[in-house]
Image (spheres, helix red, strand yellow):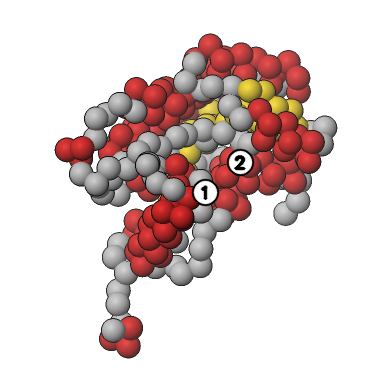
Amino acid sequence: MVNELAGKVAIVTGGASGIGRGIVERFVAEGARVVIADVEQDLGEGLVAALGRDTVFRQTDVSDPGQVAALVAAAVEKFGGLHVMVNNAGISHTMHRRFFDDDLAAFHRVMAVNVLGVMAGTRDAARHMAANGGGSIINVSSIGGIQAGGGVMTYRASKAAVIHFTKCAAIELAHYEVRVNTIAPGNIPTSLVAKSAVNMDPEQVERFEAKIRETMRDDRPLKREGTPDDVAEAALYFATDRSRYVTGTVLPVDGGTVAGKVIRRRSEG
């Protein structure tokens, strides 16, 4: 199918790189006009230059609800409406060897971006959508919000909060024909893992990330590496009428990781 989003207006937060960029590119390819929101101005403006007049960049820190409200207003003013809101912006924090060593210094910033940003984006987009025939809100969580594990505790907690909030919002906003769903990516190569390293030189960071990626591959039933395009495909589904009877769901895009442990065959040792 082509031009599935023709005539639609979308916002993608954290849209200048990684998974967000993949979603922006796919939406534009399907005919949408897209507002790219990000704190990284150079990356955002560079993406607009590459994609053309159907995109516009707005520098936005989603941890500030005032900036999120202004973002939604700007999208409506620029393109005449808002049909799809993708709350993708998110950050991680330093990975500690033990929880005992975590000073929780990043807690408020991570929660502000990953949870408050999603809540504000959902609220402000839904306000417009409710008065204009409905729409689709897509919140990007992580399999870290589904599957328990050690390491980045605040990040995991924030992503679990996104999942529960999405279900709650879906129930309340269904009355207005506003659908709210969650994508939970896993094992998608982005810069997020490397950014959780601390006090490492570039070579150590490379080894650290390679080790994490190897562990992820071992835990993943599907051996093909996931990509931002795979997440963008899921976002496209939620953004279109193909999912018109779907709300309050959590869709892992993770190669089967959260489905269960990989079964080792005897021939594999």
Which residue matches tag 1? 190
- Viewer-closest of 43 and 76: 43
Q: Are marks 2 and 1 in contact (CB under 8 Å)?
A: yes
- Provide residue 204's location: percent of width, then percent of height: 41, 54
Q: Secondary structure at mark 1?
A: loop
Query: Residue 82 location in percent, x, y?
Result: 66, 25
**Helix, strand, or loop for circle 2?**
loop
Which residue is label 2 attached to?
17
Depth order, front residue of 215/265: 215
Which kind of residue does numbered mark 1 sit on? Thr
Question: Which corner quadrant holds the C terminus?
Answer: bottom left
Q: Residue at x 55, y 18 (%)?
A: 68
| Label 2 CA crowd tier, 10 Å (few <14, some 14–19, many 20+) | some
Which of 17/159 is in front? 17
Tell me if residue 43 comes above or below residue 25 in the rendering.
above
The structure residue drawn at horizontal position 57% and vertical position 44%, both measured from the top left corner, is 18
